[in-house]
Amino acid sequence: MGNIYLYLADPGSDHAKKMHAICKSSPAIAGILQPVIDGKRCLHDIVTGEILQLEADIFDFEIVNSHSIIKSGKYLLYEESYEWAIKRAEDALASEFQLFIIDGISSIELKGSGMIQAIHRVLCTAAVAQTKKFLFVVKPKHLNEFSRLILGAIDYKIVNCITEIG
C-alpha cells in the first residue's frame, strides 16, 4: 500500500493551523482535525466544518460528572466527542475525497480508545482505495508504537508537510 502517510507533529506546534488552511482551500480533503480553540482541544470535521469540544474543563465538576470521560495524562476528554468524530469520519470515508486526515493520534489510540475505531476503518478503506491517500498525524514519541501496534506490516511514508503528499 503506497497511500498511507504519517506527519509527525510535536504537541504545541502550529500544525493544526497549517492543516486547517490547506483543508479550507481544497474540497478534496476529508477527515478529523484536533485544533486547540480558546485553550481547549476540539474535534473539527473537515467536510462539514463542524467543531465539537473534546477537552473537558477539569474545574467544572458538574459537567465532568455528567459525561463519560477519558483521562489522558492531565487531560479529561469527552468520550461522546470521540463517538461524534468517529461517526463523522465514517460518513466522510463514504464521500468523495482525495486525501483523508486523522489528526492528533496519541497514547489514547494506542490504548484502544479515542479515534481507534476510525483509524481501523481508514486502514480498511486504504487497502482497497488505491487512488486515495490517507494521512495520520502522530506525536513523534508515539511513532514506533503506532507503527508496531496499529500499522503492523503496512507500508507508510513520513512526510514533513501535507503538500508533500501530492
Image (cartoon, rainbow, N blue to C red):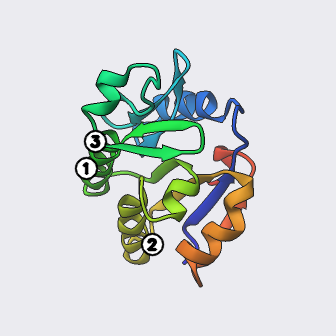
96 relative to 165 in the view: left or right: left
Using the rendered view, name the quadrant where residue 13 is placed.
top right
Q: Residues within 10 Å of mark 2 (few under 14, many from 20)?
A: few
Q: Position of residue 2 (x, y in %)?
A: 58, 73
Q: Secondary structure at mark 1?
A: helix
Q: Position of residue 151 (x, y in %)?
A: 56, 74
The answer to whether any part of residue 89 appears in the image is: yes
Please state, as top left, top right, bottom left or bottom right, where the N terminus lies in the image. Answer: bottom right
138 relative to 10 in the view: left or right: left
Using the rendered view, name the quadrant where residue 15 is placed.
top right
Mark 2 and mark 3: span between their CA atoms?
Answer: 32 Å
Q: Residues within 10 Å of mark 1 (few under 14, many from 20)?
A: some
Q: Secondary structure at mark 3?
A: helix
Q: Are marks 1 and 2 in contact (CB under 8 Å)?
A: no
Mark 1 and mark 2: span between their CA atoms?
Answer: 23 Å
Q: Secondary structure at mark 2?
A: loop
Q: Position of residue 136 (x, y in %)?
A: 56, 55
- Identified by mark 1, the residue type is Lys
For disc 3, the marked residue is 80
Q: Residue at x 34, y 30 (%)?
A: 64
The correct choice, above or below, for 53 with respect to 101 in the image is above
Q: Are marks 2 and 3 in contact (CB under 8 Å)?
A: no
Mark number displayed over residue 130: 2
The correct choice, above or below, for 32 with respect to 126 in the image is above
Mark number displayed over residue 123: none
78 relative to 25 in the view: left or right: left
For disc 1, the marked residue is 87
Mark 3 and mark 1: span between their CA atoms?
Answer: 11 Å
- Identified by mark 3, the residue type is Glu
4 relative to 128 in the view: left or right: right
Q: Residues within 10 Å of mark 3 (few under 14, many from 20)?
A: some
Q: Position of residue 26 (x, y in %)?
A: 46, 36
